[in-house]
Image (cartoon, coloured by chain):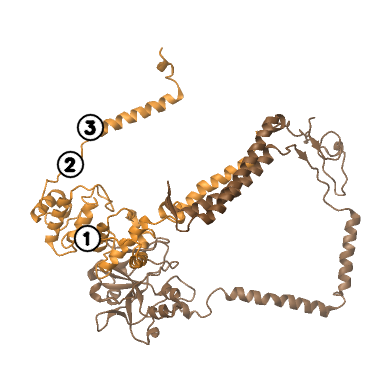
Chain colours: A orange, B brown
Amino acid sequence: MNALAARRRHPAAIALLILVGLLITGGAYSFIAPKDANASAAVATDSVDEGQKLFLGNCASCHGTNAQGTASGPSLVGVGAAAVDFQVGTGRMPMAQPAVQAPRNEVKFDEDEIASLAAYVASLGPGPAVPDGELTTVLEPGTEENNRAIAEGGEIFRVNCAMCHNFAGAGGALTRGKYAPGLEGVEPKHIYEAMVTGPQSMPVFSDTNLDPAAKQKVISYLKAQEEATNVGGLTLGNLGPVSEGLFAWVFMLGILIGAAVWLGKKAA
Amino acid sequence: MNDNQTTAAPVEGNALVPASGDGQVLPASLAAGPDTFENPGLPPHIHRAADIDPAAAKRAERQVATMFGISMLGALIFVVAYFAIRDEATFFLPGVGKTSTQNVVLGLSLGVSILFIGLGAVHWAKTLMSDEEVVEERHAQASSPEARADAVTVVSDGVESTGLTRRPVLKYSLGGALGLFALPLGLQIAGSLGPVTVGELKETLWDPENNGGKPIRLMRDPEMTPIKLEDVTNGSVFHVMPETLQHSIDERKHVLEGKAKAAVILIRLDPNDIKVQKARDWGVDGVVAYSKICTHVGCAVGLYEQQTHHLLCPCHQSTFDLTEDCKVIFGPAKRALPQLKITVDDEGYLVAPEGFAEAVGPSFWERKR
C-alpha cells in the first residue's frame, strides 16, 4: 500500500478528515449561497419621488406604505432627514434581522440614494434636518479656545453620555440585550444626528437640551479622545477594572505561578 | 548509605524515635510498634551539571554575570532617560498605540534593573551554590525541670514584690484606670457609626429653606442654566441640579456633598403613558422629575432607555419603570425613586416648589421617622 494508506489509522487522521470536510462544505456554500438582493435602483438626483420609490421597495414592509408604522416598525412621520441619514448612513437600516436592537452594519445605499430617502421622509412631517458642515466641524486641540471647548465637551459628555457610552466612549450594556455602541470611528455628522434624533434606546438630545455649540464640543471631545496619548499603556478596551482584572488574573498570576515553579525546581 | 550528612544524635539503625516528656531519647526497640517502618532515608543525590562539569559551572557563572550586567544596563538607561526624554514626548508602540515615551522607557528600565538582580541571584543559587541535602534533628521542646522551677520562682517573687496581694487599694485603682481607658476608644468607634443628627440624611439642596422659602429653579448640569418647559421635548432627558447649588459652587464648599443628594433626572413622556395619577400631578404636561440617586446603594441612575421608558442603574442593574412612578421592575432596589414635584413659574421656567417628600437615596434606619 502507499504511504497515505499506511497512515490511515494515525490518531490525527480523523481530525484532519473532519477539518477537510468542513472546509469543503463551507467553501462550497459560500460559492453556491445566494447573494443579498440589492433592490436599490440607480438614482442620480435626490428627489422626493425617487426617495418614495426606494422607500416602498426597501422600508415599507416594516414601516408601512405611508411610513405610518406597523407592528414591526415605528412611524417615521416627523423623524426628519437627520434620522434617515443616520440610520441608513450607518447601515443600521434596512435592519438585517429582527432583534432587540439594530446594530451598525454594511451601508446598503450610496449617498444619493440616502439623500433621496431623507428628502422623502423629511417631506412627511417636520423634523431635524441633516446638520450642515459648520456644526459638525471638529475643533482640533492646540489653541486655548479649542482646548477649553474640548474640555467643556468632556464635561458635557461625562454628565449626559458617559453613563451609557462609558467614560471613554467605549460603549456599554443596557437591559435585555440592548447596548450603547462604542463611539470610536463614528463620523462627526452621524454623532450629531444621533444626538439630535435619539435613535432606538438613546434619549433625544434636542437643540434646546444641548445647543448646537455644545454638540460640537462633545464631538470635538470624542475625536480628541481618539487621538489622545494612551499614557497608561494598553487600554484593554477602556473597560476599567473588568478587563484589567482579567488581564491581571490571567497573565500576572500566570507569571507569578511560573516564577514560583521555577524557584522551586532543581537546576539542571 | 550515600554522601548525606545528618546532624542527628546517633540512634540504632536509622529509625526516628519520639522523645519522651523529660527529654530523653528512647532506644528504637522500645519505641517501635508493630506499624512503624524503617526510615527509607533521602533519595540518591542527583548532581547538577555545574557540580560535575567545570565548563558548565563556568557557563552558569557567565549567565549570572550577564544577568547582573543587564540589570546594570537597565539602571544606566533609567538615569540617562530620566534627563534626556521630555515629559510630553510620545511615540507609537505597536499593540498599545500612541503612548508616553518617558513612562515606557523609565518603567521598562527600572523594571529590568530590579528584575535581573533577582533573576541573577536565583540562578546563582540554583546552579552554583551548594545543594547538598541537610537534615537538622530537633531537640525536645520542653525545658529542663530546673529551668522551669526557676521560672516559677522568678514570677512569684515578682508578684510578691509588687505588693498587689497585700495592698488591695493599688489593685482596684489599677483595674479602674485600665478599664476606663477603653472608654474613649469605644466611644470613638461607636460614635463614628453614623451621623449624630439624622436630619442631615433627609435634607437636600431642594428644600425651599435653602432658597428663603421660594421655589427652586431646575438647572442643567453642568452648565447651570435654567430650563424652560418647552425646552423639554418628548423623549429627551435632562440632568438637573437645583439653583441653590450655585451658592456652594461660588463658595467652593460642599459642592460634591450637595450634588450627591440633589441629582435629579428630568424626562418628558406622553402624559397618556403615565399610569399613576400622582406621577402625572407632580409633573407638568408629561414632564416628570425624579431623584437620580438609586434607592439601593446610591449610584446615579442615569441610563434612560427612551423606547421602553426604563431607567437603569449601572451599578447593580436596578431597573425603574417611569410610566409606573419609577417602580422597581428588576434588580436589588426595593423602593421606587422619589419624585420631585415641579411646576412652571411666571417666566416659563421649571421650578420645584417643595423639596422631596421622602429621603432620597439608599435606605437607612431612621428613614421613616
Which amino acid does the dot numbered 3 rest on?
Ile
Does label 2 or label 3 sit earlier along the sequence? 3
State whether discs 2 and 3 lie on one chain.
yes
What distance separates the C-alpha of mark 1 from that of mark 2?
A: 34 Å
Where is mark 3, residue-wise? Answer: A32
Check disc 3 and report its element: helix, strand or loop: helix
Does the residue at mark 3 contact the one at mark 1 (Cβ under 8 Å)?
no
Which residue is rendered at x = 60% and y = 74% of the image? Answer: B190
Where is mark 1, residue-wise? Answer: A133
Task: Identify the subunit bearing mark 1.
Answer: A
Which amino acid does the dot numbered 2 rest on?
Ala
Can you name the residue that lies furthest to the right here?
B146
Task: Identify the subunit bearing mark 2.
Answer: A
Is residue A56 at least partly visible in the picture?
Answer: yes
Q: Residues within 10 Å of mark 1 (few under 14, many from 20)?
A: few
x%, y% of residue B293? 40, 70
Which amino acid does the dot numbered 1 rest on?
Gly
Q: Nearer the viewer, residue B248 or B182?
A: B248
* Vertical arrangement, residue B299 with respect to residue B129, above or below: below
What distance separates the C-alpha of mark 2 from that of mark 3?
A: 15 Å
Where is mark 2, residue-wise? Answer: A37
Give the side of residue B103 with respect to residue B186, left or right.
left
What distance separates the C-alpha of mark 3 from that of mark 1?
A: 44 Å
Choose top left, top right, bottom left or bottom right for residue B297: bottom left
x%, y% of residue A88? 21, 52
Give the side of residue B331 with respect to residue B181, left or right.
left
Does label 1 or label 2 sit earlier along the sequence? 2
